[in-house]
Every structure is written in C-alpha cells, then in structure tokens.
Image (cartoon, grey):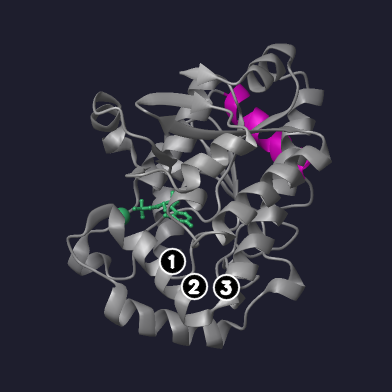
Amino acid sequence: MRYSAEVRSAIDAGRPVVAVESTILTHGLSLPRALDLAFGVDEAIRVRGAVPAFLAMVRGELRVGLDRGELEWLASAEGRVKLSMADLGVSSARRLSGGTTAAVTAWIAARAGIRVALAGGLGGVHRDVLDTWDISGDLNTLASSSVLMVCGGIKTFLDIGKSLEALETLGVPVLSYRQDRFPGYYVRESEFPAIRVDSGEEAVGIALRHWEIGRSGGLLLGVPIPEEAALSGQRIEAIISRVLADAGGKGDGKHVTPRIIRAIEQETGGATAAANRALIVAAAEVAADAAIALANFGQ
Ligand code: PSU
Ligand code: MN
C-alpha cells in the first residue's frame, strides 16, 4: 500500500482522515460530472477540517490518498476497473488501475488504521435477488472491517429492506443522521427505521463503544439527501422501474450496478446527477465531523 505524503503524516499525527471510495469517480456519473463530484467531496471534507484519502489501485498498487491530478487521471484512465473484494489480487497481478467499491474502501481503510470511511450509496441486496442471487459484497465486507461507514444510504434501486435485514444478520449497527428512518438515497427517508444520531460525534461515540466492548467490524451511518436536492419518491420509482426493466441484468456480476446508475443518469439528465452530488457532499461533511470527533477522542 502506498500512502500520499499528506495522508501518511495525518495518520501518524492522529489528525482526522476520511477514506473515500473511488468508484463514484470511475464507474458512476459521466464526465465531467463524476470529476466535479469527486472534487466537491474533496473540498467538503477539507473545509470541515479533515483530510480526504481517496483510495484506488494504480497500476497494480493500492493507493491511500490521491491528489487532484491523480483523480483527474483515474476518472478517465484507459481500462480502469471496478474493484470489488474478489478482484484485488487479479487486478494487482495484472497491474490494472481502478476505483474502490465501498467494500474495498472499508477493507483498505481498516488496514490503514483509518476509522471513518465515505461511500456514495452502499451496495446491497438487489430487488431481483431471488432470480440473480445478487447481493453486494459491501455488506459482508463492512461486517468484517472496523470502520464507521458514512454514506447517503443504500441505493434506491436496491431492496433497502432486505439489505437492512442482511446487515442485521451480519451484526452491523445501522444509524441514521438526524432522523428516525434510514435514508432512501435519492429521497430523504426510506420506510425503514434506524438508530437516530444527531452528530458525527454521537456516531463516533457509539462506534468506539462498539469496539471497546469487544465487537470488531463496521457500523453504517446513513445521511439523508438535503431537502432541496431530494427527488420525488414517485418520480424516481417510475424511472427506476423503467431502467430496471431494460438495464437490470442477470449473471452480469459487478457490471449491473454501474449500468443502472448510468441509465438513471441518462433518463433524468442533470436531475439525478445534481442529487447525487448534493447527497454525497452532505455525507462527506458528516464523515469529516465524525473523523474530527474521533481525533478529539484521541483515537
Ligand atoms: N457509485 C457509483 N457507481 C458505482 C458505485 C457507487 O456511482 O458503481 C458502487 C459502490 O462503490 C458500491 C458498489 O460499493 O457500487 C456496489 O457494487 P456491487 O453491487 O457490484 O457490489
Ligand atoms: Mn452485485
């Protein structure tokens, strides 16, 4: 693993660091929107007073901390891959470059000693799970990686209820920021309850307790999309069912999620892209607050 000088010295000095997934950059929105989103996240974390550590693989090497030039390069790197847990060895052996899913982000962060991580939307149980068996590796990897994973929720086109049930089975506490229901990604609330916390500090207090009493593994904190950026539930549901009807897929492994995300972007033009940016930036701010609280706790 190679660290940027900035991230290395922040970790060593106990300054607040947020590990950031990079699939939002490599396999999310089209360019230049994806890059604008990554820069927005970078900026939001810095403005709050923490150090962003974008994770990636660059020519076979795991990297912790990318500067703006590297983010720009990665966004359009030839042959870039989406790195799930199963891909790490293969992609490294082949000297590939790519973006980290939430799973790989949690795993690298835990190994690097970074306790707060940021994902856009966590992967989960797909709606057609009974036919496809498609359950994201994000769930079980989070369960075994000791990080507080902050995100904008579980992607709306998944089965949020089943995903939360799976997390319950895996023993992952699910927290929600300033509301009693878990966020719905493009919409503020899903119909499912979660444990309300009112600050990053409160979430960190729970995470530290969780680890102190002897549990290892991750916790999930969902941050709702800001009111003014939220989409109408009915509208997004109509779009999602259309997209899933022709872009959902069987036996297509990790290509399913990026294809659905891109199809939703195309169907709605700028609308979901703006929503995506707003919700990830909001989650980034809370992640930064959590990292700062953790540093203040001396952890
Ligand atoms: N955001 C995007 N595109 C993506 C993802 C997020 O704009 O592809 C990723 C996340 O990194 C998440 C992953 O961890 O999708 C889940 O993919 P899968 O369902 O294949 O596990
Ligand atoms: Mn999958």
For the residue labelled by badge 1, is the local secondary structure a helix, a strand or a loop? helix
> The residue under label 2 is which amino acid type?
Glu
Q: From the Cβ of disc 1, is ligand 1 less than 8 Å away?
A: yes
Residue at figure coordinates x 76%, y 33% from the top left: 50
The answer to whether the residue labelled 1 contacts the one labelled 2, judged by CB atoms less than 8 Å apart, is yes
The residue identified by callout 3 is 272
Residues rendered magenta in the picture: 200-213
**Image quadrant of residue 171?**
top left
**Does the rendering let one see residue 216?**
no
The residue identified by callout 2 is 265
The answer to whether the residue labelled 2 contacts the one labelled 3, judged by CB atoms less than 8 Å apart, is yes
Residue 101 in the image: state x and y as whole percent. 43, 44
> The residue under label 1 is which amino acid type?
Ile
- Of 271 and 109, nearer the camera is 271
Residue 159 in the image: state x and y as whole percent. 40, 67
- Is 19 on the left-hand or right-hand side of 253? right
- Is 200 on the left-hand or right-hand side of 109? right
> The residue under label 3 is which amino acid type?
Thr
Examine the rendered structure and indicate whether residue 183 appears above or below residue 240: above
Residue at figure coordinates x 42%, y 36% from the top left: 104
Per the picture, the main secondary structure of the magenta-coloured stretch is helix
